[in-house]
Image: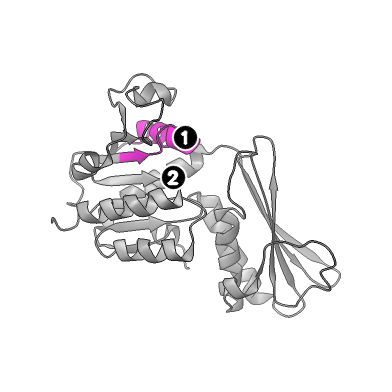
């Protein structure tokens, strides 16, 4: 097997988009088209997709680009330098294995990943440059840094609740971004999110337990992403909010992450804090 991908040269970075026919897949293809230093190498869709064989540029709303959508990922990965992956947990674990074999930069924006999935991704990252985040926007990652600071400064007597809303078609809850913000709050408090998270309330729940981090997920319409972190104290409340108006900003961040990974050149498991140089 080859070592890590070669360092950047005058040639653009060859990127594969998996889930090319989905909302994010189309946005990723557009972002690659609009970004200097990268080129779309391959577009992958699931077996049996009606989009197979179609020009990926046309599917994404662009001019034809000569890159047909295919279901065969392996040969695409072999000659690529990076893969952008906003698919499903099972597919992402599979692609992580292929990316590790090919020593690629693997950018993962898939949500709904379980602890077992993360364990497999981290194992694959021993042989790839894997960059995972619940959200690839600059604003959200800056928000997470602020949430961590606020949670650290405001301890006893301050309750934390995270409210998120997304479009009606989103299939997982809470969102990956909400969990990213919850992790930031938990780190600020020096606690484990898995032990502190309250993901649903119904019926006679009793008084709120001190130190818990609550989540509420709203679904409807065409909302791209709306996240609010509420820190509620005695007689006062702080609300930190991020509103995403265009999912293209996530795609742009993912391409930025791929370029960072290619330049970085060292295998491992990374996040957007590494890409943006934000203190974790």
Residue holding disc 1: 22
SS for dot 1:
loop
Image: magenta residue range: 16-35
Q: Position of residue 228 (x, y in %)?
A: 68, 55
| Up-down relation of residue 184 to residue 175 (above or below) | below
Q: What residue appears at the point 61 percent right and 69 percent down from the top-left corner? A: 185
Q: Quadrant of the N terminus?
A: bottom left
Q: Position of residue 75 (x, y in %)?
A: 20, 40
Q: Quadrant of residue 58?
A: top left
- In the foreground, 261 or 122: 122
How would you classify the magenta stretch by its main secondary structure? helix
| Up-down relation of residue 176 to residue 75 (above or below) | below
Residue found at the far left of this picture: 1
> Badge 1 local density, few (<14 within 10 Å), some, or many (20+)?
some
- In the foreground, 33 or 75: 75
SS for dot 2:
loop
Q: Quadrant of residue 144?
A: bottom right
| Up-down relation of residue 56 to residue 94 (above or below) | above
- Inter-mark Cα distance, 1 to 2: 9 Å
- Tell me if label 1 and label 2 are in contact, CB under 8 Å: yes
Q: Report the colour scheme.
A: one colour
Residue holding disc 2: 87
- In the foreground, 103 or 148: 103
Q: What residue appears at the point 44 percent right and 61 percent down from the top-left corner? A: 273
Name the N-terminal-most of marks 1 and 2.
1
| Up-down relation of residue 214 to residue 82 (above or below) | below
């Amino acid at each position: 097997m080859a070592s890590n991908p070669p360092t950047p040269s005058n040639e653009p970075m060859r990127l594969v988009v998996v889930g090319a026919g989905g909302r994010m897949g189309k946005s990723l293809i557009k972002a690659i088209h609009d970004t200097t230093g990268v080129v779309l190498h391959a577009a992958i869709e699931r077996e049996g997709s009606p989009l197979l064989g179609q020009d990926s540029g046309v599917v994404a709303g662009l001019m034809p680009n000569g890159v047909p959508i295919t279901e065969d990922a392996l040969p695409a990965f072999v000659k690529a330098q990076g893969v952008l992956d906003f698919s499903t947990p099972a597919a992402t674990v599979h692609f992580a294995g292929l990316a590790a074999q090919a020593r690629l930069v693997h950018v993962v924006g898939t949500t709904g990943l379980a602890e077992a999935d993360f364990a497999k991704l981290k194992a694959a990252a021993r042989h790839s440059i894997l960059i995972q985040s619940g959200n690839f926007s600059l604003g959200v990652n800056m928000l997470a840094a602020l949430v961590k600071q606020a949670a650290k400064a405001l301890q006893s007597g301050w309750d934390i609740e995270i409210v998120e809303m997304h479009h009606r078609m989103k299939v997982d809850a809470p969102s990956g971004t909400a969990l990213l913000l919850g992790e930031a709050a938990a780190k600020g408090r020096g606690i484990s999110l898995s032990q502190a998270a309250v993901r649903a309330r119904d019926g006679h729940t009793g008084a709120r337990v001190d130190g818990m981090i609550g989540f509420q997920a709203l679904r409807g319409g065409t909302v791209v992403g709306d996240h609010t972190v509420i820190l509620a104290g005695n007689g006062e409340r702080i609300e930190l909010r991020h509103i995403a108006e265009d999912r293209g900003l996530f795609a742009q961040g993912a391409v930025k992450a791929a370029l960072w990974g290619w330049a970085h050149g060292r295998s491992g498991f990374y996040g957007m804090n590494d890409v943006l140089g934000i203190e974790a």
